[in-house]
Image (cartoon, rainbow, N blue to C red):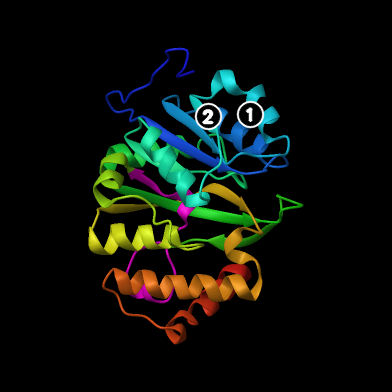
Amino acid sequence: MRLAGIRKSSLPNKPLITVITVVFNGESTIKDTIESVLGQTYDNVEFIIIDGGSTDKTLDVIRRYQDKIDYWISERDRGLYDAMNKGIALASGNYIGMLNSDDYFASSSSLEILASNMNSTNADLIFATLDIVDSRNPDRILRKYRVRTYSSFLMRIGIMPPHPTVYCKKTVYLHAGPYRLDYRIAADFEMLVRLLLRHKVTWHFVDEVVVKMRAGGISTRGLKSYWTINREIARACRENGLYTNMLLLALKLPARIWERLS
């Protein structure tokens, strides 16, 4: 759409929301992601897809919808967070959110709900609730990811707002700087602790499930990933002036168990 000269902008009481989807070899799930964006009732949405040079049929799927996608690109990159940075640089929206190719909006009104709260609060950063679902049976909810508030204590034990529900003003992203590429798994955590703790952005929690995420992402792949992400979380806290250690991070486990029981 952008190459055809169609550009979008924010309107009175209707901020332009940019949804960025990052994908690499996601042919089995990208269709659901795209359709959940295109099916939103909120009508001032910019949709950008950053593909990392997929070698499967991902691009075939994208091309089927390209007349409704504002901009997409496929090229090799330096990983997930490099692709997110590319998307932010391309975005025109007042608010920007990341909906990766394993994620999809929980309902057609998800962005309508978020936009209403953007208008009523003018917060720098909005976040909501997320359901983690079975990758083979999305109707089966494995865990409710609900963080009602932000506090330095929660960050110290490794609990952050669910990143796929976070929508942040582009001006804030530009001021804070890009996602760090020297983090393998936890650059999203580092970004949020940087925004909330160091830059003290204003925030607002929306108590609605707006996104569903399929289980099995990079941060949940076994003990090695668990060890890596906790080391990176500890580093992210330290580099942003917040002390934590591996013992404190172990306190996250009871919270995760409670989410599953809930």
Report the residue at 51% width, 49% height from top. Answer: 78
Label 2 close to label 1 by CB (< 8 Å): yes
Label 1 SS: helix
Report the residue at 66% width, 59% height from top. Answer: 216
Label 2 SS: strand
Task: Identify the magenta region.
Answer: 148-168
Relative to 20, 8 lies left or right: left
For label 1, the crowd category at 10 Å Cα-Cα, with few meaning under 14, some 14 to 19 and many 20 or more, is some
Magenta-drawn stretch contains 143: no
List the residue tagged with mark 1: 62
Image height check: is 118 above or below 207?
above
Q: Residue 181's quadrant in the figure?
A: bottom left
Magenta-drawn stretch contains 152: yes
Q: What is the number of the mark on residue 72? A: 2
Report the residue at 24% width, 63% height from top. Answer: 198
Q: Which amino acid type is marked by label 2? A: Trp
Which residue occupies the extreme right position in the image?
136
- Of pointers 2 and 1, the one earlier in the residue sequence: 1
